[in-house]
Amino acid sequence: MEKEISRLEEEFQKDLSLVKSREDLEKLRIKYLGRKSPINQLFTQITHLENREEKALWGKNVNSLKEKISSIIEEKLKNAEIKEDRLDLTFPSSQVYLGSLHILSIVNNSICSIFERMGFIVIEGGEIEDEKHNFSSLNIHLQHPSRDVFDTFYLDIPEGNEGRLLLRSHTSPSQIRVMEKNKPPLAVISPGRVYRPDKVDASHSFMFHQIEGFAVDKGINFSHLKGVLTYFAKSFFSSEVEVRFRPHFFPFTEPSVEVDVSCIICKSKHLGKGYEHKCSVCRGKGWLEILGAGMIHPQVLKNCGIDSKRYTGFAFGMGVDRIAMLKYGIDDIRLFYQNDIRFLEQFYI
C-alpha cells in the first residue's frame, strides 16, 4: 500500500509537469480524482484489510494524497484563469465606435458661427414661455389668423400675469425678452427647440429646431438685412449660390420676405429649368426656401419699450432641420430623431 501511494504521487508529479493548458489540467483531474481513478481503487483495497488500525492508517494516507492532488490541481486552474483574463496588448482589438455631435448640432453650430463673425452674440431663451412673449408682443393677438399656425402645447399650470404658459412655438420670444431688458444697439442670434401641433410626416415634426436673429440700431434698413442674409447663404451653402427675396406676410415684421437660394443640387437658377435634371430637392423650381425675414414691425419695438421713431431693426428665422435637409439632400425629417447609427455616422466629424 505504501509503495502504491508513493508510485501514484511520483506519476502525478510527472504528468503535472507535462500540463500546458486548462484542457490538460481537466484531463489530469479526471485521471487522478475521477470515479475510476487509481486513488478510488486504493480506497476499495483498504476495505480488504483485516486490522482496524491499518484500515484507519491507510485510509488517512490515501485521503491525504487525494487532498494534496486536488489542492494542486485547483491552484493550477485558478492561475490558468488569471492568465487567460490578463489583457493581451498584441491581440487585435474589436472595432471602437467614437461619439460625435449630432448632425443638427453640427449645422446649428455652423450657422451660429457665421453670424458671430458678423458681430452677433448668441443668447438661448427658455423653451417654456407665456402668451405675452410668444404671441401678443409679436403682434399675434388672440383672434389673429396666424395664431392657429403657432398655437402649441399649453401647460397645466395656473395662468400668470402674462397669460398661460406653453411650450414656445418659435424662437422669436427670445427677441422680445432681449429687447425688453437691453437698449440698442443689439445684434443677437438665438437657437433652440420649438414645438407646434403638427402631425409627424416626412417634412413635419411636433418638435424641431429654429434659429432667430435680429438687429436693432439707428439707421438700419432693408439693405442691411439683405447683406447679412446673402453673406450667410454664401458662407453656409456655397459662394456660387444666388439669393432672392420674395414678398410675404409675417405679423411681427413689415415689410416681410421669404428668402430663397438657388438649388445647390442641380445648380439651376431659373424657374422650370430644374425639370431637365429631375432634381429631387428643388422639384424643378430651381430655388430652395431657407428662411423668413423682414424689418421689425414698429409696434413690436414699442411693445418692448424701444422708440420706433429713433430705432429700426430687422429680424429673421430659419429651421435648422430644414437647412440641414437642404444642404445634405435629406428627404425625411424623421431620420434626425430615429437614432439610427447607419444614418448618423455619415456625418461624423
Image (spheres, rainbow, N blue to C red):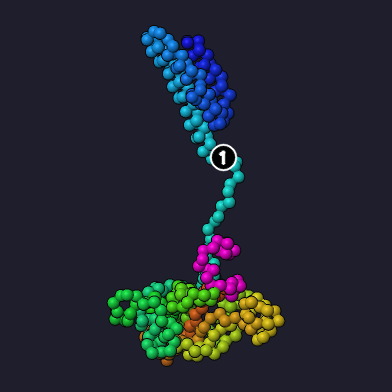
Q: State the image coordinates of residue 82 (x, y, percent, origin top left).
A: 50, 35
What residue is shown at x 43% (from left), y 72% (from top)?
Answer: 124
Q: Residue furthest right?
A: 276
What residue is shown at x 68% (from left), y 82% (from top)?
Answer: 275
What residue is shown at x 57% (from left), y 81% (from top)?
Answer: 289
Q: Is residue 135 above or below residue 195?
A: below
Q: Quadrant of residue 162?
A: bottom left
Q: Nearer the viewer, residue 275 or 221?
A: 275
Q: Residue furthest top?
A: 51
State which quarter of the image contains the C terminus. bottom right
Q: State the image coordinates of residue 264 (x, y, percent, origin top left).
A: 64, 76
Q: Is 339 a magenta residue?
A: yes
Q: Is residue 66 above or below residue 314?
A: above
> Secondary structure under badge 1?
loop
Q: Left or right: where does residue 123 sit relative to residue 164?
A: right
Q: State the image coordinates of residue 344 (x, y, percent, origin top left).
A: 56, 64
Residue of label 1:
88
Q: Nearer the viewer, residue 320 or 228?
A: 320
Q: Left or right: where does residue 240 sit relative to residue 155?
A: right
Q: Is 147 a magenta residue?
A: no
Q: State the image coordinates of residue 302 (x, y, percent, origin top left).
A: 38, 88
Q: Which residues are magenta?
A: 326-347
The disc labelled 1 sits on which kind of residue?
Asp
Q: Nearer the viewer, residue 11 or 205?
A: 11
What residue is shown at x 40% (from left), y 73% (from top)?
Answer: 127
